[in-house]
């Protein structure tokens, strides 16, 4: 996916098993979408703990965090609870979207997971920026995510500038 392209409106169960659409989760707000190898990867565990430290800021800034993996909902639910995450995990356990998105982690021939990547999305799911997280330092830092969310918010909120007195 390249900046300006529309990210597919994923339709998958969340960590509770409830069917969800990415556009519904966005709810008119910017989204940071992360594809993840899964709960078993120590790099994913470390990165997700960092996202949990960022979730308060996202909530008060009207932005969303969504994680996508091949873990089944019950595994995602346990992982999410263990992290203390309040954001949504989407389960592609049946791997319906994995080939369509072209994000198969080809070096893992056991789990066949998603390649770690991140996408910052406009409320209409247009891609703002992409990150290749195959190597840990390719993932966006918290400051990069804040920058992306600021840029998106400035663009989509008519009231970004405070009204004149």
Image (spheres, rainbow, N blue to C red):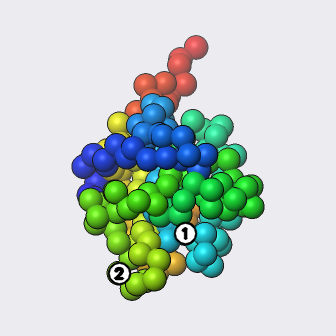
Q: Which residue is label 1 attached to?
A: 38
Disc 2 + disc 1, Cβ < 8 Å: no
Q: Residue at x 31, y 47 (%)?
A: 8
The foreground one among 165 and 33 is: 33
Question: Looking at the picture, how far across and down is residue 142, in whole percent?
Answer: 58, 61
First in sequence: mark 2 vs mark 1: 1
Q: Secondary structure at mark 2?
A: loop
Q: Residue at x 42, y 39 (%)?
A: 21
Q: Secondary structure at mark 1?
A: loop
Q: Is residue 13 above or below residue 67?
A: above
Q: Residue at x 34, y 57 (%)?
A: 96
Question: Looking at the picture, how far across and down is residue 162, in whole percent?
Answer: 55, 25
Crowding at label 2, few (<14), some or many (≥20) Cα neighbours within 10 Å?
A: few
Q: Quadrant of the C terminus?
A: top right
Total marks in image: 2
The foreground one among 86 and 95 is: 95
The foreground one among 120 and 147 is: 120
Q: Is residue 153 above or below residue 8?
A: above
Crowding at label 1, few (<14), some or many (≥20) Cα neighbours within 10 Å?
A: many
Q: Quadrant of the N terminus?
A: bottom left
Question: Looking at the picture, how far across and down is residue 51, in whole percent?
Answer: 63, 59
Q: Is residue 71 visible?
A: yes
Mark number, residue 107: none
Q: Which residue is label 2 attached to?
A: 106
Task: Report the Cα–Cα distance between label 2 and label 1.
Answer: 14 Å
Most distant residue in the top direction = 165
Q: Is residue 106 above or below residue 94?
A: below
Q: Is residue 155 above or below residue 93?
A: above
């Amino acid at each position: 996916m390249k900046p300006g392209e529309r990210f597919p409106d994923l339709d998958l169960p969340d960590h509770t098993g409830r069917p969800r659409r990415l556009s519904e989760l966005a709810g008119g707000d910017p989204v940071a979408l992360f594809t993840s190898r899964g709960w078993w990867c120590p790099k994913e565990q470390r990165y997700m703990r960092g996202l949990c430290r960022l979730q308060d800021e996202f909530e008060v800034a009207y932005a969303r965090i969504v994680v996508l993996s091949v873990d089944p909902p019950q595994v995602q639910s346990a992982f999410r609870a263990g992290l203390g995450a309040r954001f949504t995990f989407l389960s592609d356990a049946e791997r319906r979207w994995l080939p369509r998105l072209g994000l198969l982690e080809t070096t893992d021939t056991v789990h066949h997971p998603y390649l770690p990547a991140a996408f910052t999305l406009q409320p209409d799911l247009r891609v703002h920026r992409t990150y290749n997280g195959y190597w840990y330092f390719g993932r966006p830092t918290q400051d990069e995510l804040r920058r992306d969310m600021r840029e998106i918010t400035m663009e989509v909120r008519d009231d970004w500038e405070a009204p004149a007195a």
